[in-house]
Image (cartoon, rainbow, N blue to C red):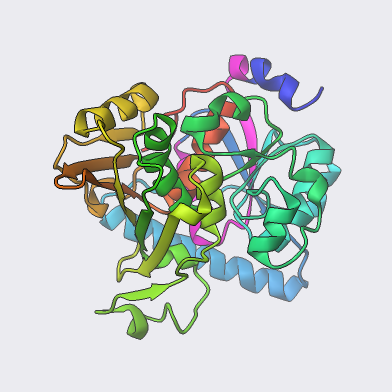
Amino acid sequence: MPAVGRTEIIATIGLITAGIIGYRGYTGEELQKLLARHPRVSAVLIDQAAKTQAASAAAESLTTKARQAARQAMSQAGRRSFPNPPVRLARDVLAGPPLDVVFLATPPEASVEWVPRFLRQGSRAIDLSSAFRIASPDTFARWYGTAHPCPEWLAEAVYGLTEVYRGRIATARLVANPGCYATAAALALRPLERHGLIDKASLVVCDAKTGVSGAGNKATQATHFCSVDENYSVYGTMNHRHVAEIVATTEIPEERFCFSTQLMPLRRGIMACLYFRLREGADAAGIEGAYLADYENDPFIALYPEGSFPSVASVSHTNFCCIGYSVTQPGNRAIVVAVIDNLVKGASGQAVQNMNAMFGFPETEGLP
Protein backbone atom coordinates (compact mmCIF):
# COMPACT_ATOMS: atom_id res chain seq x y z
CA MET A 1 0.00 0.00 0.00
CA PRO A 2 1.52 3.43 -0.91
CA ALA A 3 2.67 5.55 2.04
CA VAL A 4 0.21 8.35 1.40
CA GLY A 5 -2.69 5.91 1.20
CA ARG A 6 -1.98 4.71 4.73
CA THR A 7 -2.78 8.09 6.31
CA GLU A 8 -6.39 7.37 7.27
CA ILE A 9 -5.56 3.89 8.58
CA ILE A 10 -2.62 5.16 10.63
CA ALA A 11 -4.71 7.99 12.07
CA THR A 12 -7.26 5.39 13.20
CA ILE A 13 -4.68 3.02 14.67
CA GLY A 14 -2.81 5.95 16.20
CA LEU A 15 0.79 4.67 15.95
CA ILE A 16 3.44 5.25 13.30
CA THR A 17 7.11 4.29 12.96
CA ALA A 18 9.60 7.11 12.49
CA GLY A 19 13.31 6.97 11.75
CA ILE A 20 15.91 9.66 12.44
CA ILE A 21 19.04 9.91 10.31
CA GLY A 22 21.57 12.34 11.77
CA TYR A 23 20.39 11.77 15.32
CA ARG A 24 23.68 12.84 16.95
CA GLY A 25 23.42 16.53 15.96
CA TYR A 26 21.54 19.32 17.72
CA THR A 27 18.41 18.93 15.60
CA GLY A 28 18.62 15.14 15.79
CA GLU A 29 18.77 15.25 19.59
CA GLU A 30 15.84 17.68 19.60
CA LEU A 31 13.86 15.30 17.38
CA GLN A 32 14.52 12.45 19.80
CA LYS A 33 13.16 14.47 22.71
CA LEU A 34 10.06 15.55 20.79
CA LEU A 35 9.26 12.09 19.43
CA ALA A 36 9.79 10.53 22.87
CA ARG A 37 6.90 12.65 24.18
CA HIS A 38 4.71 11.99 21.14
CA PRO A 39 1.97 9.49 22.01
CA ARG A 40 1.58 8.13 18.48
CA VAL A 41 5.18 7.55 17.40
CA SER A 42 7.63 4.69 17.78
CA ALA A 43 11.09 6.00 16.89
CA VAL A 44 14.23 4.29 15.61
CA LEU A 45 17.68 5.84 15.13
CA ILE A 46 19.34 5.13 11.79
CA ASP A 47 23.10 4.94 11.28
CA GLN A 48 24.12 5.85 7.75
CA ALA A 49 27.02 3.45 7.39
CA ALA A 50 28.45 0.34 9.03
CA LYS A 51 31.66 0.80 11.01
CA THR A 52 34.30 -1.66 12.11
CA GLN A 53 33.33 -3.63 15.19
CA ALA A 54 35.84 -1.76 17.34
CA ALA A 55 34.74 1.66 16.05
CA SER A 56 31.08 0.79 16.52
CA ALA A 57 31.70 -0.35 20.11
CA ALA A 58 33.65 2.84 20.89
CA ALA A 59 31.01 5.06 19.31
CA GLU A 60 28.21 3.26 21.14
CA SER A 61 30.08 3.65 24.43
CA LEU A 62 30.51 7.38 23.86
CA THR A 63 26.89 7.74 22.79
CA THR A 64 25.66 5.92 25.90
CA LYS A 65 27.80 8.11 28.16
CA ALA A 66 26.57 11.23 26.40
CA ARG A 67 22.94 10.18 26.81
CA GLN A 68 23.44 9.39 30.48
CA ALA A 69 24.99 12.82 31.00
CA ALA A 70 22.16 14.47 29.05
CA ARG A 71 19.49 12.67 31.06
CA GLN A 72 21.20 13.66 34.31
CA ALA A 73 21.49 17.29 33.22
CA MET A 74 17.86 17.38 32.09
CA SER A 75 16.74 15.84 35.39
CA GLN A 76 18.72 18.41 37.35
CA ALA A 77 17.15 21.16 35.25
CA GLY A 78 13.68 19.78 35.91
CA ARG A 79 13.18 18.72 32.30
CA ARG A 80 11.69 15.42 31.17
CA SER A 81 14.29 12.79 30.25
CA PHE A 82 13.85 10.69 27.13
CA PRO A 83 14.50 6.99 26.45
CA ASN A 84 17.06 5.53 24.09
CA PRO A 85 15.37 4.39 20.86
CA PRO A 86 16.89 1.38 19.08
CA VAL A 87 19.70 1.99 16.59
CA ARG A 88 19.67 0.28 13.18
CA LEU A 89 21.85 0.50 10.10
CA ALA A 90 20.27 2.26 7.13
CA ARG A 91 20.94 -0.73 4.87
CA ASP A 92 18.99 -2.99 7.28
CA VAL A 93 16.09 -0.54 7.47
CA LEU A 94 15.95 -0.34 3.67
CA ALA A 95 15.95 -4.14 3.43
CA GLY A 96 12.91 -4.49 5.68
CA PRO A 97 9.34 -3.13 5.78
CA PRO A 98 9.25 0.65 5.16
CA LEU A 99 9.05 3.04 8.07
CA ASP A 100 6.09 5.39 7.90
CA VAL A 101 8.31 8.48 7.93
CA VAL A 102 12.03 9.22 8.00
CA PHE A 103 13.48 12.47 9.36
CA LEU A 104 16.80 13.55 7.88
CA ALA A 105 18.74 15.84 10.21
CA THR A 106 21.70 15.63 7.85
CA PRO A 107 23.84 17.83 5.61
CA PRO A 108 22.32 18.27 2.13
CA GLU A 109 24.81 15.92 0.49
CA ALA A 110 23.60 13.11 2.76
CA SER A 111 19.94 14.01 2.22
CA VAL A 112 20.19 13.76 -1.57
CA GLU A 113 21.69 10.28 -1.12
CA TRP A 114 19.13 8.88 1.31
CA VAL A 115 15.84 10.63 0.49
CA PRO A 116 15.32 8.95 -2.92
CA ARG A 117 16.15 5.54 -1.47
CA PHE A 118 13.62 5.79 1.35
CA LEU A 119 10.96 7.27 -0.94
CA ARG A 120 11.39 4.40 -3.40
CA GLN A 121 11.08 1.94 -0.53
CA GLY A 122 7.70 3.43 0.44
CA SER A 123 8.55 5.69 3.39
CA ARG A 124 7.67 9.35 3.50
CA ALA A 125 10.48 11.80 4.24
CA ILE A 126 10.91 15.08 6.09
CA ASP A 127 14.26 16.60 5.20
CA LEU A 128 15.68 19.22 7.57
CA SER A 129 18.56 20.16 5.26
CA SER A 130 18.52 22.66 2.42
CA ALA A 131 18.61 19.95 -0.26
CA PHE A 132 15.00 20.19 -1.47
CA ARG A 133 13.80 23.63 -0.38
CA ILE A 134 14.25 25.34 -3.75
CA ALA A 135 11.80 24.18 -6.41
CA SER A 136 13.74 25.41 -9.44
CA PRO A 137 17.03 23.68 -10.40
CA ASP A 138 18.28 26.97 -11.90
CA THR A 139 17.52 28.89 -8.71
CA PHE A 140 19.17 26.18 -6.65
CA ALA A 141 22.30 26.36 -8.80
CA ARG A 142 22.42 30.13 -8.48
CA TRP A 143 22.23 30.16 -4.67
CA TYR A 144 24.25 27.03 -3.94
CA GLY A 145 26.84 27.35 -6.67
CA THR A 146 26.35 23.84 -8.05
CA ALA A 147 23.83 21.82 -10.02
CA HIS A 148 21.35 19.84 -7.95
CA PRO A 149 22.38 16.15 -7.94
CA CYS A 150 18.80 14.83 -8.24
CA PRO A 151 16.63 17.63 -9.70
CA GLU A 152 13.82 15.21 -10.53
CA TRP A 153 12.82 15.25 -6.84
CA LEU A 154 12.63 19.05 -6.50
CA ALA A 155 9.23 19.31 -8.16
CA GLU A 156 7.75 16.73 -5.79
CA ALA A 157 9.07 18.30 -2.57
CA VAL A 158 6.57 20.41 -0.62
CA TYR A 159 7.98 23.37 1.28
CA GLY A 160 7.25 22.64 4.93
CA LEU A 161 6.08 25.98 6.32
CA THR A 162 3.12 24.36 8.03
CA GLU A 163 0.95 27.44 8.53
CA VAL A 164 1.08 28.21 4.81
CA TYR A 165 1.22 24.82 3.06
CA ARG A 166 -0.47 22.37 5.44
CA GLY A 167 -2.96 21.31 2.74
CA ARG A 168 -0.18 20.15 0.41
CA ILE A 169 1.89 18.74 3.29
CA ALA A 170 -0.97 16.40 4.25
CA THR A 171 -0.55 14.34 1.06
CA ALA A 172 3.17 14.88 0.44
CA ARG A 173 5.74 12.11 0.21
CA LEU A 174 8.64 14.54 0.63
CA VAL A 175 8.56 17.64 2.84
CA ALA A 176 11.45 20.12 2.77
CA ASN A 177 11.62 21.67 6.22
CA PRO A 178 12.31 25.44 5.98
CA GLY A 179 15.43 27.14 7.22
CA CYS A 180 15.27 28.79 10.65
CA TYR A 181 15.74 32.37 9.41
CA ALA A 182 13.28 31.73 6.59
CA THR A 183 10.65 30.46 9.03
CA ALA A 184 10.73 33.59 11.19
CA ALA A 185 10.96 36.08 8.32
CA ALA A 186 8.36 34.44 6.08
CA LEU A 187 5.79 33.99 8.84
CA ALA A 188 6.16 37.68 9.72
CA LEU A 189 6.17 39.09 6.17
CA ARG A 190 3.86 36.89 4.12
CA PRO A 191 0.49 38.11 5.49
CA LEU A 192 1.54 41.74 5.10
CA GLU A 193 2.62 41.33 1.48
CA ARG A 194 -0.33 39.04 0.68
CA HIS A 195 -2.83 41.61 1.97
CA GLY A 196 -1.11 44.47 0.13
CA LEU A 197 0.03 46.43 3.20
CA ILE A 198 3.67 46.99 2.26
CA ASP A 199 4.47 49.95 0.01
CA LYS A 200 5.49 48.49 -3.36
CA ALA A 201 8.33 51.00 -3.59
CA SER A 202 9.57 50.27 -0.08
CA LEU A 203 12.78 48.43 0.67
CA VAL A 204 12.11 45.61 3.15
CA VAL A 205 15.02 45.22 5.54
CA CYS A 206 15.36 42.01 7.56
CA ASP A 207 17.93 42.30 10.33
CA ALA A 208 18.15 38.78 11.77
CA LYS A 209 20.08 37.21 14.64
CA THR A 210 20.70 33.61 15.70
CA GLY A 211 22.04 31.67 18.64
CA VAL A 212 25.19 29.59 18.17
CA SER A 213 23.36 26.25 17.86
CA GLY A 214 22.11 27.47 14.48
CA ALA A 215 25.60 26.72 13.13
CA GLY A 216 25.40 23.04 14.12
CA ASN A 217 27.56 21.14 16.59
CA LYS A 218 30.71 20.90 14.46
CA ALA A 219 33.51 22.90 16.09
CA THR A 220 34.69 25.88 14.04
CA GLN A 221 36.78 28.97 14.67
CA ALA A 222 33.71 31.20 14.36
CA THR A 223 31.68 29.23 16.93
CA HIS A 224 34.47 28.59 19.42
CA PHE A 225 33.57 29.80 22.93
CA CYS A 226 36.34 32.40 22.87
CA SER A 227 35.04 33.76 19.57
CA VAL A 228 31.40 33.97 20.63
CA ASP A 229 31.43 34.85 24.32
CA GLU A 230 30.95 38.58 25.00
CA ASN A 231 30.86 39.18 21.26
CA TYR A 232 28.35 39.95 18.51
CA SER A 233 29.25 39.48 14.85
CA VAL A 234 27.83 39.89 11.36
CA TYR A 235 27.99 37.15 8.72
CA GLY A 236 26.19 36.09 5.51
CA THR A 237 25.02 39.59 4.58
CA MET A 238 22.76 39.94 1.51
CA ASN A 239 23.66 36.58 -0.03
CA HIS A 240 22.48 34.22 2.71
CA ARG A 241 20.85 31.16 1.12
CA HIS A 242 17.66 31.57 3.15
CA VAL A 243 16.91 34.66 1.03
CA ALA A 244 15.81 32.35 -1.81
CA GLU A 245 13.25 30.71 0.49
CA ILE A 246 11.97 33.99 1.91
CA VAL A 247 11.35 35.72 -1.42
CA ALA A 248 9.73 32.58 -2.85
CA THR A 249 7.34 32.25 0.10
CA THR A 250 6.49 35.93 0.57
CA GLU A 251 6.60 36.92 -3.14
CA ILE A 252 8.53 40.07 -2.20
CA PRO A 253 10.85 40.81 -5.15
CA GLU A 254 14.47 40.10 -4.34
CA GLU A 255 15.53 43.58 -5.42
CA ARG A 256 13.35 45.01 -2.62
CA PHE A 257 14.61 42.65 0.07
CA CYS A 258 17.72 43.42 2.13
CA PHE A 259 18.86 40.65 4.49
CA SER A 260 21.53 40.65 7.17
CA THR A 261 22.43 37.99 9.74
CA GLN A 262 24.26 38.22 13.05
CA LEU A 263 25.54 35.69 15.57
CA MET A 264 24.41 36.19 19.18
CA PRO A 265 26.28 34.78 22.19
CA LEU A 266 23.26 32.60 23.04
CA ARG A 267 22.69 28.84 22.78
CA ARG A 268 19.45 29.06 20.82
CA GLY A 269 16.95 31.49 19.35
CA ILE A 270 16.17 33.55 16.26
CA MET A 271 15.10 37.20 16.23
CA ALA A 272 14.10 38.75 12.90
CA CYS A 273 13.61 42.53 12.97
CA LEU A 274 11.85 43.78 9.82
CA TYR A 275 11.66 47.40 8.66
CA PHE A 276 9.54 48.83 5.81
CA ARG A 277 6.93 51.44 4.89
CA LEU A 278 3.22 50.72 4.76
CA ARG A 279 1.28 51.69 1.66
CA GLU A 280 -0.76 54.87 1.81
CA GLY A 281 -3.91 54.36 3.88
CA ALA A 282 -2.61 51.28 5.72
CA ASP A 283 -2.13 51.41 9.48
CA ALA A 284 -1.51 49.33 12.59
CA ALA A 285 -5.08 48.03 12.57
CA GLY A 286 -4.46 46.70 9.06
CA ILE A 287 -1.38 44.81 10.27
CA GLU A 288 -3.35 43.22 13.09
CA GLY A 289 -6.15 42.34 10.67
CA ALA A 290 -3.75 40.69 8.20
CA TYR A 291 -2.19 38.50 10.89
CA LEU A 292 -5.55 37.53 12.35
CA ALA A 293 -6.94 36.72 8.90
CA ASP A 294 -4.04 34.35 8.17
CA TYR A 295 -3.15 32.97 11.60
CA GLU A 296 -6.13 33.28 13.95
CA ASN A 297 -6.59 29.50 14.10
CA ASP A 298 -2.90 28.59 14.06
CA PRO A 299 -1.88 27.17 17.44
CA PHE A 300 1.79 28.17 17.27
CA ILE A 301 1.48 31.82 16.16
CA ALA A 302 1.20 34.39 18.97
CA LEU A 303 0.50 38.03 18.02
CA TYR A 304 1.51 40.73 20.50
CA PRO A 305 -0.46 44.00 20.88
CA GLU A 306 0.83 46.98 18.93
CA GLY A 307 3.94 48.44 20.53
CA SER A 308 4.83 45.23 22.39
CA PHE A 309 7.63 42.97 21.24
CA PRO A 310 8.57 39.38 22.11
CA SER A 311 11.98 38.34 23.39
CA VAL A 312 14.03 35.31 22.40
CA ALA A 313 13.56 33.85 25.88
CA SER A 314 9.78 33.93 25.45
CA VAL A 315 9.92 31.13 22.85
CA SER A 316 12.89 29.10 24.11
CA HIS A 317 12.22 25.33 23.97
CA THR A 318 8.80 25.89 22.34
CA ASN A 319 7.36 25.58 18.84
CA PHE A 320 5.91 29.11 18.89
CA CYS A 321 6.55 32.02 16.57
CA CYS A 322 5.76 35.25 18.45
CA ILE A 323 5.24 38.44 16.45
CA GLY A 324 5.15 42.07 17.60
CA TYR A 325 4.79 45.26 15.55
CA SER A 326 4.70 49.04 15.67
CA VAL A 327 3.86 51.82 13.21
CA THR A 328 5.20 55.36 13.47
CA GLN A 329 4.91 58.71 11.68
CA PRO A 330 5.99 60.53 9.63
CA GLY A 331 6.41 58.19 6.69
CA ASN A 332 4.12 55.38 7.85
CA ARG A 333 7.17 53.38 8.91
CA ALA A 334 6.63 49.92 10.38
CA ILE A 335 8.70 47.59 12.50
CA VAL A 336 7.84 43.90 12.91
CA VAL A 337 9.75 41.55 15.22
CA ALA A 338 9.41 37.76 14.99
CA VAL A 339 11.13 35.32 17.35
CA ILE A 340 11.44 31.53 17.29
CA ASP A 341 13.59 28.82 18.84
CA ASN A 342 15.88 27.83 15.96
CA LEU A 343 16.04 24.19 17.11
CA VAL A 344 12.28 23.79 17.59
CA LYS A 345 10.07 25.97 15.35
CA GLY A 346 13.13 26.61 13.18
CA ALA A 347 13.94 22.91 12.75
CA SER A 348 12.83 19.83 14.72
CA GLY A 349 9.57 21.16 16.15
CA GLN A 350 8.36 22.30 12.75
CA ALA A 351 9.38 18.91 11.36
CA VAL A 352 7.17 17.17 13.94
CA GLN A 353 4.37 19.66 13.21
CA ASN A 354 4.68 18.69 9.54
CA MET A 355 4.61 15.00 10.47
CA ASN A 356 1.40 15.61 12.41
CA ALA A 357 -0.12 17.30 9.36
CA MET A 358 1.00 14.42 7.11
CA PHE A 359 -0.62 11.72 9.24
CA GLY A 360 -3.80 13.47 10.31
CA PHE A 361 -2.75 14.06 13.93
CA PRO A 362 -3.50 17.33 15.79
CA GLU A 363 -0.66 19.72 14.89
CA THR A 364 0.08 20.34 18.57
CA GLU A 365 0.58 16.63 19.34
CA GLY A 366 3.88 16.05 21.15
CA LEU A 367 4.98 19.70 20.85
CA PRO A 368 5.79 22.21 23.59
Residue 56 magenta-drawn?
no
**Residue 264 position in % (x across, y down):** 31, 68
Residue located 36% across and 49% down the image: 202
Quadrant in the rendering for residue 197: top left
Residue at 26% in and 53% down: 312
Seen at 28% across and 34% down, the residue is 302
Q: Which residues are magenta?
A: 11-37
Q: Nearer the viewer, residue 229 or 365?
A: 229
Residue shown at the point (57%, 33%) measured from the top left: 355
Front-most of residues 194 and 113: 194
Please provide percent x and percent y for residue 148: 77, 58
- Is residue 84 in sight in this rendering? no
Q: Is residue 24 magenta?
A: yes
Q: Nearer the viewer, residue 21 or 110?
A: 110
- Left or right of 250? Residue 108 is right
Residue 247 in picture, x, y percent from top left: 52, 48
User: Split into 4 quadrants, where in the image is the N terminus?
Assistant: top right
